[in-house]
Amino acid sequence: MLTQEQIDAFQIDGAVLLKGVFSDYVEGVRQAIEENKSNPSWRERTYYPDDGSAAFFQDYVVWDQFAGYRSLVRESVMAQLAAQLMQSTTARMFHDHVLVKEPGNSIVTPWHQDAPYYLAEATQTISFWVPLDPIPRERTIEYVAGSHRWNKHYRPQRFDGSALFENDTAEAVPDIEAKRAELEILGWAVEPGDAVAFQFGCLHGAPANSSDSRRRVVSFRWVGDDAVFADRPGPTSPAFPDIEFVPGQPFDDPQFPVLWPRADCERDI
Ligand SMILES: O=C(O)CCC(=O)C(=O)O
C-alpha cells in the first residue's frame, strides 16, 4: 500500500501525508467522539479559553472503550502501516489522543515534541493524526522537517503553556515562528479519513480554529520493536499510574497490545 517515497519521507522528514487511508472509518470515529464527549475518561483535559471562545476537548487512552475508535485501531490497516513506516517487525498500540477544537476555539497548539513526556522511549515511533473534518492548509497541523533527527528532547509544556514537569532543566523549544524562513515547514490541507503520520520526536504545532466549522481530530500513537520504558522527571502525559515498570526494560504491558503482525493474519495470506 505504501510507496518507498512515503516510507523515505517519514524516515527523513519525520512526517508524511497519507491520503484517504481511513475514509471507511470516518463515520464511526465521529460517532465515537460524540459518545466520548458525553462520557469522558478520568484523563479528560478540556481547555476553556479565557476569551470566552469555544472549548478544546481532549481525552486520552479511550481507543478500546468506544466502538468507532476501536474498529479503526483493530480492523483498519493502521497497525500494518505503522510497522511499515517505522521499519519495525511489530506495531504496538500505545494510546490515542482526542483533540476537538470547536468552532472559534482560540487555542494555538504550541510547537512541541511528544517524545519527552511519553512513557515509551524508542526510535521506532509513529502517530497517525486523523482529521474528521476538512482542514485547509492555513489551519492544519505543521511539522519542522527532520527535527526528529536533531537528537533533542525539548522541555515539554501543556497546551496552555504551563510546565509539564516541575524543575525541568531541559532546553526550551526554539522560537519556530521566528525561524520559519530558515526551516522547512511541512503541512497539508486534509480531508476526513486522511492521516498525517509523524514521529514522536518531530516538532509540530497547530493553529487555533478561527473557522465556523469544528476541527475534530484523533491521534493514534504506536511504537515498534525497540521501545522501552522511559525515565521521565515526572508523571507522563498521558499518565499510566497503575503500571509498575523499570526504565529501560522492554515496553510491554497488556494495555499496549501488539496489533501487527495480526493474530488472524494467516487468513489474509
Ligand atoms: O491537533 C493538534 O492541535 C495537536 C496535535 C498534536 O500535538 C499531536 O497529535 O501530537
Image: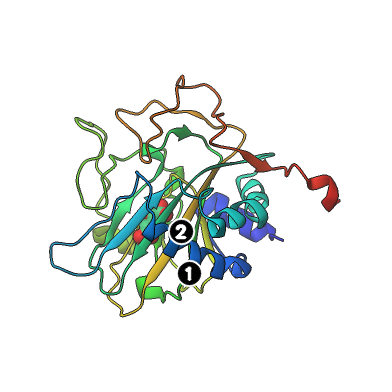
| Number of marks in picture | 2
Ligand 1: does it lie within 8 Å of the C-beta at label 2? Answer: no
- In terms of sequence position, does the residue under pointer 1 or pointer 2 come before the other? 1
| Mark 2 element type | strand
Identify the colour scheme used.
rainbow
Residue 193 in view (yes/no): no
Q: 149 or 108: which is nearer to us?
A: 108
Q: 262 or 126: which is nearer to us?
A: 262
Ligand 1 lies in quarter: bottom left
Locate residue 172, reporting x and y percent: 24, 42
- Point 47% across, 34% down: residue: 120
88 over 249 or under it: above or below: below
Q: CA distance from mark 1 to mark 2?
A: 8 Å
| Mark 1 element type | loop
- Point 84% across, 50% down: residue: 267
Which numbered marker is on residue 132?
A: 1
Q: Are marks 1 and 2 in contact (CB under 8 Å)?
A: yes
- Tell which residue pokes out farthest to the left in this image: 51
Bin the neighbour count of mark 1 within 10 Å (Cα to Cα): few under 14, some 14-19, many 20 and up.
Answer: many
Q: Quick one: quadrant of the N terminus? A: bottom right
User: Disc 2 residue type?
Assistant: Val
Locate residue 223, reporting x and y percent: 55, 40
The residue where tag 2 is placed is 218
